[in-house]
Image (cartoon, rainbow, N blue to C red):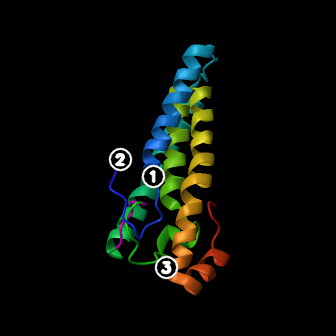
């Protein structure tokens, strides 16, 4: 469990672990429920494209956070409002990247359960992480964040 800064969104569980845990639960569901697997080259090809695209989103977003001198971890204090790069088209490029990579991994593995697990992770992150982050950013950055929020969608 990370040490949570008092002046932070108070996120209690790291979002990457939510995605990994949900994906693993989906793989377990495949085994327990004996779900069919996706077969063929198209799921694997699309999967690898999504993994790479997700990595690009995550890497670029981390770079913009570090260049702005702020923390990417949602349990740390925010020092700057990042609105450039992919943040111009989505307020959550890191989480979008995690979702894309997760869907990609599920496709590469041919797992319907993992696809469902990633969908579950998106709902959990949206409801239990992003909501806290947005409330915190509105308190810290006020009108600047409100204007950004009106201009840019939460996901895509």
The answer to whether marks 1 and 2 mark residues whose Cβ atoms lie closer than 8 Å is yes
Q: Using the image, determine if residue 128 lies above or below residue 70.
A: above
Q: Quadrant of the C terminus?
A: bottom right
Q: Position of residue 96 (x, y in %)?
A: 54, 54
Tell me the quarter of the picture where residue 131 sits. Answer: bottom right
Mark nearer the N terminus (3 vs 1): 1
Quickly name the residue at label 1.
12
Instruction: Compare residues 4 and 104 and report the one nearer the observer.
Output: 4
Q: Residue at x 43, y 67 (%)?
A: 8
Single out the residue that lies furthest toward the bottom. 143
Give SS at disc 1.
loop
Is 121 on the left or on the right of 51, as rendered? right
Q: Using the image, determine if residue 78 lies above or below residue 72.
A: below
Q: Residue at x 47, y 57 (%)?
A: 94
Q: Position of residue 7 (x, y in %)?
A: 41, 71
Instruction: Compare residues 124 and 103 and report the one nearer the observer.
Output: 124
Mark nearer the N terminus (1 vs 2): 2
Q: Residue at x 43, y 56 (%)?
A: 58
Q: Position of residue 25 (x, y in %)?
A: 53, 28
Q: Which mark is residue 1?
A: 2
Quickly name the residue at label 3.
140
Q: Residue at x 52, y 25 (%)?
A: 27
Give SS at disc 2.
loop
Q: Position of residue 104 (x, y in %)?
A: 52, 39
Dot 3, how many residues are within 10 Å of its Cα: few (below 14), some (14-19), or many (20+)?
A: some
Residue stretch rendered in magenta on the structure: 70-74
Distance, label 1 to label 2, CA atoms, is 8 Å
């Amino acid at each position: 469990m990370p040490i949570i800064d008092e002046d932070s969104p108070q996120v209690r569980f790291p979002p990457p672990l939510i995605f990994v845990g949900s994906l693993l639960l989906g793989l377990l569901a495949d085994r327990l429920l004996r779900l069919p697997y996706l077969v063929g080259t198209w799921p694997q090809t699309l999967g690898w494209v999504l993994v790479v695209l997700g990595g690009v989103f995550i890497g670029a977003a981390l770079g913009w956070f570090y260049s702005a001198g702020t923390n990417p971890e949602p349990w740390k204090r925010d020092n700057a409002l990042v609105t450039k790069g992919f943040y111009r088209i989505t307020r959550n490029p890191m989480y979008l990247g995690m979702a894309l990579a997760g869907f990609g991994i599920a496709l590469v593995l041919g797992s319907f359960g993992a696809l469902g697990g990633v969908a579950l992770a998106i709902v959990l992150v949206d409801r239990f992480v992003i909501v806290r982050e947005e409330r915190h950013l509105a308190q810290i950055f006020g009108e600047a964040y409100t204007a950004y929020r009106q201009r840019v969608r939460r996901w895509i």
